[in-house]
Image: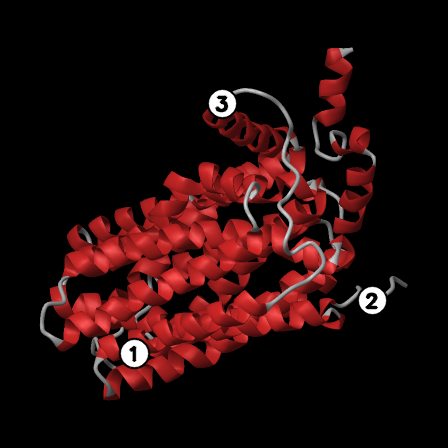
Amino acid sequence: MSAPPLSAWDVPAYRTYLAARALAMAGGALTLVALPVLVYRLTGSATLTALMAAAETLPYLVLGLPAGALVDRWHRRRVLVGTSLGVALLLAAIPLADAVGVLTYPQLLLTGLLVGALFVFADAASFGVVPQMVGRERVASATSLLVTVGTAISVAGPVVAGVLVATLPVALVIGLDAAAHLVAGLVLARLRWEGSETRPAVAAGGGSRRTRLGADILEGLRFVLGQPVVRALTLLGIGCSLAGGAVAGLVVVIGVERLGLGAEDAAIGWLFAAGALGTFVASLALPRLQQRVGVGIITTCGFAVAAVAVGALSATTSLVLALVLLACFHLASTTLIVNGIVVRQVVTPDALQGRVNTTARMIAWGGSPLGAAAAGVVAGTAGVEWALRLAAGALLVSLVGALVWGVARYPRLAALEVERAEPGRARKCAPGAARTERERS
């Protein structure tokens, strides 16, 4: 019988960090509903609403590589503080512009791009902060706690947001998110832990600053493409991000055009809350699941469930069934995403955490803006149901890839921790690696 995993909750600094993140996520849950509603109210366009979702995720595709390498050189805590305060400033401009009657779609699009860019740097810093703060033996617990708290907020947040959107000016709801990020940034500014004021170790060497940065980026990319499990989970994750971008960009449109809801109907919040509920269940189950089941089985089953859920969502006009299917899709997609994150954090050296994780996210999440944009165009021309079928097709491609690649045979998380301590064994954990070794010899 395996021992229960060590809990990150026992680390005081992590509890404060979690509280700050929870506050920011609570604000984000409001904007998750309010922003697409505001865009749809301003434009009445399914395509422009989906493009808004694309704008929020596009920066990862553009900035993922340099952001990871840069954050591995910077003070990670200060990056978290600066990005949180920057988001607060950008979001606060929306209700101000709305109050004086000058709010436009281009401003919202630019805000989405800039907030997304700040998120890339914050995300890179967070990847390194968590293992440093709690130790590698508590990474799975810390990630699960963060996701659990975040999704608990996300279950209630969209419901609350739906009520607020129906009763308050929509832009003012986004202003509440700005206040939440401001307070979170101030909390993080006072937080300290062992190693919080030091920069991660970077490779020594001569050359210009630009040359060293390029070398750092390449080092992270080589690790992602050279570590068999990380490489497979990252490349297959493109299908999940394509589908996730499509679904995220069309939630409001699905509610209005397929389910017959009003654009500012409080029930729109239920659609977001259903997805968050699925994420919540995934976050609770994943740590135990990773103890008992190989990361490859988790990945393969996740793609299968997600593909079925999105395919069925394309065919329904029932609100109740849509809620169930959204919950199932987010349960599967969150399992895929968090499983990949934990694997990367466990097997990656500390000095590479930022660039490896942002590189992997950039490759895997690169499909999100493309999925959102493509879904918006297809929804605007052929209908929402065809956009969702396109998303289901992307998941099926990843599922077939996982089956062909033999991903189901990948080991449990504990075995990957051992393989990190013995690098020579890491290459052998993926199917086909043994054959490659024989061919080389």
Q: Which residue is mark 2?
A: 4
Q: Nearer the viewer, residue 425 or 348?
A: 348
Quadrant into which the C terminus falls: top right
Q: Earlier in the sequence, mark 1 or mark 3?
A: 1
Residue 251 visible somewhere in the drawing:
no
Left or right of residue 63, residue 412 in this image = right
Name the residue furthest top: 441
Q: Secondary structure at mark 1?
A: helix
In this rendered view, identify the residue nearer to me: 380 or 96.
96
Q: Name the mark on residue 48.
A: none
Query: Where residue 91 appears, x then y in whole percent?
Result: 30, 67
Label 1 with label 2: CB-CB less than 8 Å:
no
Name the N-terminal-most of marks 1 and 2: 2
Residue position marked by numbered label 1 in the rendering: 173
Q: Which residue is mark 3?
A: 208
Q: CA distance from mark 2 to mark 3?
A: 48 Å
Q: Secondary structure at mark 2?
A: loop
Q: Earlier in the sequence, mark 2 or mark 3?
A: 2
Rendered location of residue 438, percent (x, y)? 77, 16
Give the residue furthest to the bottom. 167
Determine if residue 233 is in view: yes
